[in-house]
Amino acid sequence: MSTSISATSRIRITDKIKAHLELLDPVTWISVFPCLAAGVMASGSMQPTLHDYLMLFALFFIYGPLGTGFSQSVNDYYDLELDRVNEPTRPIPSGRLTEKEALWNWSIVLFVAVMLGSWISIHIGGIRAVVFASALFTGLFVGFIYSAPPLKLKKNIFLSAPAVGLSYGFITYLSANALFSEIRPEVLGLAGLNFFMAMALIIMNDFKSKDGDAKGGMKSLAVMIGTRNTFLVAFVIIDLVFAVFAILAWNWGFHILMYFILASFAVSLFIQVPIYRDPETGASFMQNAVDDGFGNAIGKSEVHAHNAFLRFQIINNFLFLINQLVAAGLIGMKYM
């Protein structure tokens, strides 16, 4: 009998741990990694030493499991009623975690992030410490007010999209650069490009919860202007990002890279056109990549417009990622 009770207790503990981890939404952690990696590369100052590798690990840990995990946990905590409609299988609405347990989840993660971020800032010192700490704490603050009342930035796309762009696309670059060197001017350009790219992507990502958002009073762009017009706005932002990226690459002296950026721009446009014409089934030739290839990484959706966004995202994000990593590498080489 005691053995059976002990085994049951272990199962319950394991289930709780899994639920707490799910609340931190691990699949979202990787979204900040490319910008962090590019910021480090562009600094041109990381050395192949144990110290620098540990600092790199701390950077990814603080912005991935801690920073991004914190924002996802807070989001679930304050969106309980909305998730009962949109995502009833999440840890809190499904009953696997209580609201109090969820509160402890993001409170502990926030405490660890603040302590680790403060230690890193003290360790690097100087202006770089100010930049690193300011960026990190701004990201944590924005991650909280994004979901928490009374501000709840996510209720209005004109506040939520810039908040996501700032947290995921801008401050990550600054922190990664500041961890190893003074801020490179070119990094500000790449950070700005990522700010707007993240804005465009979050605008389209809202397709998955359009019905729930409409019922809950969330002012996503898809709710306000419709699916096709939302795609148009997002595509215009993305196209401008690629165009400015090409101009910056030329001005930085990366002429060959500029041609690759323009080629990537052309491919992105090729995918955009059929999706704009048919927001539900456009670019269906990419569907196998979602179903059988990248679905586990980027997610899957039963909402047709969101599924079209996922098809577009596979190509667009890959091309943008490769070009920005190459640009970051070339920038770093200038400062080595």
Image (cartoon, helix red, strand yellow):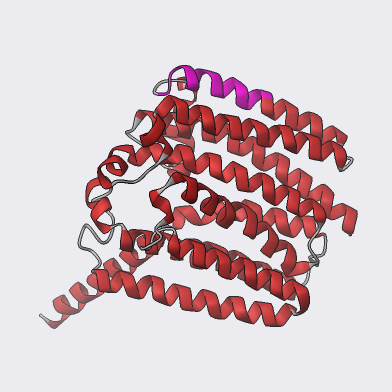
Using the image as rendered, state which of residue 200 and residue 43 is in the foreground: 200
Q: Residue at x 41, y 60 (%)?
A: 151
Q: Nearer the viewer, residue 143 or 218?
A: 218
- Relative vertical location of residue 18 with respect to residue 113 in this rendering, above or below: above
Q: Is residue 281 above or below residue 52?
A: above
Q: Is residue 309 visible?
A: yes
Placement of the C terminus among the 4 image quadrants? bottom right
Q: Residue 221 vs residue 19: left or right? A: right
Task: Please tell me which residue is depicted at 74% across the width and 78% down the height of the picture.
Answer: 124
Q: Which residue is located at x 41 percent, y 59 percent? A: 72
Q: Position of residue 201 (x, y in %)?
A: 52, 40
Residue 63 in the image: state x and y as whole percent.
56, 64
* Quadrant holding the N terminus: bottom left
Please indicate whether residue 224 sits to the left or right of residue 39 in the image.
left
Label count reads 0
Stretch in magenta: 266-279
Q: Is residue 266 left or right of residue 332?
A: left
> Image height check: is 272 above or below 194?
above
Residue 49: name its quadrant: bottom right
Is 124 left, or right, of 217 in this rendering? right
Residue 13 seen: no
Residue 201 lies in the magenta stretch: no
